[in-house]
Amino acid sequence: MLEDLKEEEIVNKVGGRFKLSTLIQKRLVQLNAGSRPLVVSKSENKMEVVLQEILEDKIFLDGSHEVKVTGELQEGAAGPNINPLSV
């Protein structure tokens, strides 16, 4: 999965290397803080989970460079960890 970073497809999907780096970093922070993966993955490697989320169009950066979730969750995926106090 990490070899996907060498491909232009993932770079073009998010709009450039800077945006890809930003998206990966921000999503890793979310996962490390307890957010649940949006995809079913056999890997425990969070970087691979983020790359799979990007390739499956589950996450993207909005205009203010914040991570947004899109698409349908896969069966078995936990979904976002939403704090009920922030709703």
Image: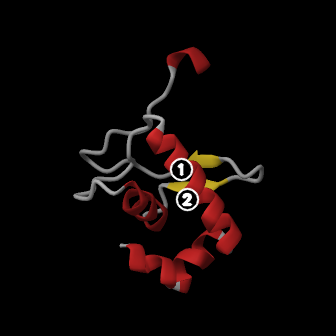
Front position in the image: 1 or 14: 1
Residues under numbered marks 2 and 1 in contact, where contact means CB atoms less than 8 Å apart = yes
> Which label is found at residue 1?
none
Whole-angstrom CA distance, mark 2 to mark 1, is: 5 Å
Which quarter of the figure has residue 52? bottom left
Residue at 41 percent across and 80 percent down: it is: 3
Q: Check the image and report above or below for 10 versus 6.
A: above
In the picture of the structure, the residue carrying the numbered disc 2 is 24
Please provide percent x and percent y for residue 10. 53, 75
**Three-letter code for the amino acid on which mark 1 is drawn:** Arg
Residue 9: image location, x then y, percent: 53, 81
- Residue 87 in view in this figure: no
**Extreme residue toward the right, this view:** 64
Which part of the image, by quadrant, shows the C terminus?
top right
Apparent side of residue 73 relative to residue 16 in the rendered image (left or right)? left
> Residue 71 in the image: x percent, y percent?
47, 52
Residue drawn at point x = 72 percent, y = 52 percent: 65
Furthest residue toward top: 85
Rendered view: 28 above or below 21? above
- Residue receiving disc 1: 27
* Mark 2, secondary structure of its residue: helix
Q: Residues within 10 Å of mark 2 (few under 14, many from 20)?
A: many
Q: Residues within 10 Å of mark 1 (few under 14, many from 20)?
A: many
Residue drawn at x 39%, y 48% as measured from the top left: 38
Q: Which three-letter amino acid code belongs to the residue tagged 2?
A: Ile
Instruction: Out of 6 and 39, give the one closest to the viewer.
Output: 6
Q: For this rendering, which residue is in front, 23 or 59?
A: 23
